Every structure is written in structure tokens, then in C-alpha cells.
Image (cartoon, rainbow, N blue to C red):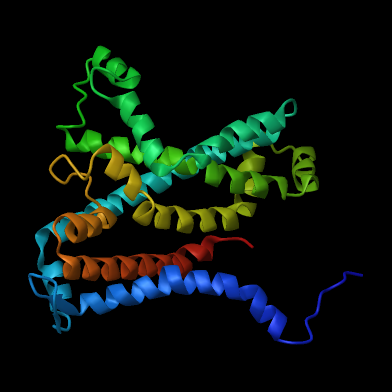
Amino acid sequence: MQRRVIFRGTLLPCLLVAPQLAVTLVFFFWPAGQAFWQSLHREDPFGLSSRFVGLDNFAAVLADPDYADAILRTLVFSVAVTALVLAPSLLLAVMADRVVKAAAAYKTVLLLPYAVAPAVAGVLWLFLFYPNVGLLGLALTALGVEWNYFLNGAQAMALVVIASAWKQISYNFLFFLAGLQSIPKSLLEAAAIDGANARRRFWTIVFPLLSPTAFFLIVVDIVYAFFDTFAVIRSVTRGGPGKATEILVYKVYYDGWEAQDLNASAAQSVILMAIVVALTALQFRYVERRVHY
């Protein structure tokens, strides 16, 4: 019989969750409320006063053609990062699950990139792909590729996608490995007895049972691509060349901090949050249908 802890009062449970609630209120709801308030106001040039303008800031942001380009650029970037993260992490998890000797060391090495800060990850890949100096930059030049992400927007986007995906692969690997280890071995043994080869066992048994984990990671990776990749872009390309890597979260920073347009930046942050919430809702509405719990 499983023993359960029962709190007879409400004071102790409230005290236990109070620190987390305080962190959430201070670092999420309070800044979000300030951003929403600023998005509805417009400050004077000296920042001494502000006046209520309603939805004018949102209208100005949405009418900006550069913002529409940033939305499209962000969608392409997030899809590319998510796809580049999921496939290698699943492959590495499947391979690690088969390792018998030195399995702990192998898994630890694969988890190390997650401990690297996003800005550091960006600098590492910047050094590797630096034109005519980095190892991979020299290799591409030797192969006849005119590699210079300072001038080529597509190359710059590819570089930040690779750096951002590399940082997140370890996180996905950990969850996929946990999902693989939770699958009953008896199911795989029964399928092997029935004559199913390794590939068929994976696609008919393992992959469907991993679908809840994969769905969770898709949601997490898209949110990661929208928000947590700012440091990578800031350290590698700073949104360039020619705004080729300026995704929405970087545009919020640039317009608010460098261009000093705080009200437009606040409106952009509210729109960004709405886009992420809408994408998450769509995933739960349509993608979750294919999940086997």
C-alpha cells in the first residue's frame, strides 16, 4: 500500500509554494504587467511624462514592414532550430540506450553542452566558423565555399541555427533517454520473437511510446527558439548582416535599448508573448492528437 502525505491545514502548503509564487510574481507577472502598461502609453522625448495612446503602438508596430519580415524570419528560425535539435538528440538517445560499457561517462559527455551558457555557445561556434581563421571556416574555404557570414545573410542564419541547436540538444537527449528507459523491455522482446527487426520495432513500438516526450520537447524547443536564443544572436551576429538574423526577441531588445523606443519595444514584447501562446495552443489543439499516452 502506497503511503501519502496529507496536510490537514492550509498554512503549511501555502508556505511551501510561497517562494515559487513570489519568484513568478516578481520575475514574470510584474515585468509583463509593466510591459503591457508601457505598450499602451507614449513617453515624451525626455522621458518625463507619458500619455495614454491605446493601441496606437501596436498599430505602428504591425504596420512596419520590417516587423513582418522579422516574424517570418523568426518562424523559419524556430522551425529550423527545432528540427535540428530533435533528430540528433533522438539518435543520440537511441545510441546511448544501447551502450553497456562506460554508459555513465558517455551520457555525461553528451549532457555537458547544456551546462554552457548561450552566449558562450555562440562564441564557440563563432570561433569555429570565423572566415579564414576558424577550423570549419578554413575547411569550407578549402572546399571552394565562399564562406563569410559577415556579408552573407543565409550563412549567418545557418550559423546561429547551428549554435542554438547545439546548445539545446543535450536537454532533448536527456528526456528522450528517460523515455526510452521507461519503455518495458518485454514489449520489445515480444516483437523480436514475432520476427520484427530493429527498425520495425523502433517505428511501431518505440517511436509511438515516445510521442508524449516528443510533443513536450517540440513545445519547449519552439519556446526556446523564440526567447532563449537572444544571447546566441547577440554574441555572434547582432542581428546582421542587414537584419538577416534579427528575430523578434532581438528586435525587442534593439528597438528598446539601442533605438530607445521603449513603447514600441513594449508593444513588440506583448505581441511576441501572444504569438508564442497562440503557437503553443495550436500545438496542443492539433499536434497532441497524434500523441499516444
Residue 94 picture location, percent across and down:
62, 37
Residue 214 picture location, percent across and down:
54, 53
Residue 26 picture location, percent across and down:
44, 71
Q: Nearer the viewer, residue 99 or 228?
A: 228
Q: Nearer the viewer, residue 278 or 102?
A: 102
Which image quarter is the N terminus in? bottom right
Which image quarter is the C terminus in? bottom right
In this view, which residue lies farthest toward the bottom? 9
Badge count: 0
The quadrant in which residue 241 appears is top left
Q: Residue at x 56, y 61 (%)?
A: 291
On the picture, is 7 further left or further right than 109? right
**In this picture, is 251 found above or below 148?**
below
The quadrant in which residue 155 appears is top left
On the picture, is 243 further left or further right than 209? left
Q: Is residue 95 visible?
A: no
In this view, which residue lies farthest toward the right? 1
Residue 159 picture location, percent across and down:
30, 35
Q: Residue at x 40, y 37 (%)?
A: 120
Q: Residue at x 29, y 72 (%)?
A: 35
Q: Is residue 51 visible?
A: yes
On the picture, is 1 further left or further right than 37? right
In this view, which residue lies farthest toward the top? 142
Q: Nearer the viewer, residue 151 or 205?
A: 151
Q: Residue at x 29, y 65 (%)?
A: 272
On the picture, is 267 further left or further right than 48? right
The quadrant in which residue 66 appears is bottom left
